[in-house]
Amino acid sequence: MYNTILFTSGDGNRLFGESGADTSSSYLNTDAAVNGMNIFLKLHEIVPVASADLGTDTADGAFKAGTAAMHITGPWNVAPFTEAGIDFGVTTLPSLTNGGDPAASFSGTR
């Protein structure tokens, strides 16, 4: 869920609604969420790696090695990446569609 939430949160779709408090639905069966997951599926055509091989350690390692152009992670990696001497920046998530709203991260804060 953590690594795929940006694909289900495009075009303004939010898990548990806009306020984050609507427990009547997970909002994973919306047009925006389905379209986002279709984009996610297309990535497998480009990078045919089994999802089991894309755990946190693998993603962190690829970023540290300079073999990943970007890495969507959290504040827990700022110190380790800084200590590893990686020149990195922090920015907003992109939109999944041309002109769409930016995707959202899976966060417990707003």
Image (cartoon, helix red, strand yellow):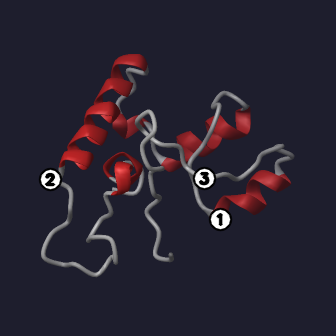
Amino acid identity at mark 3: Thr
- Above or below, 12 relative to 110: above
Q: Which residue is mark 3?
A: 92
Amino acid identity at mark 1: Pro
For mark 2, give the secondary structure: loop
* Residue found at the far bottom of this picture: 21
Q: Which label belongs to residue 55? A: none
Q: Which residue is mark 1?
A: 75
Q: Which label belongs to residue 29? A: 2
Mark 1 crowd level (few <14, some 14–19, many ≥20, 10 Å Cα): few
Give the percent coordinates (x, y) of residue 83. 84, 55
| The N terminus - image quarter | bottom left
Q: Residue at x 39, y 26 (%)?
A: 49
Q: Earlier in the sequence, mark 1 or mark 2?
A: 2
Judged by depth in the image, the label closer to the viewer, 3 or 1, is: 3
Judged by depth in the image, the label closer to the viewer, 1 or 2, is: 2
Q: CA distance from mark 3 to mark 1?
A: 13 Å
- Above or below, 15 relative to 12: below
For mark 3, give the secondary structure: loop
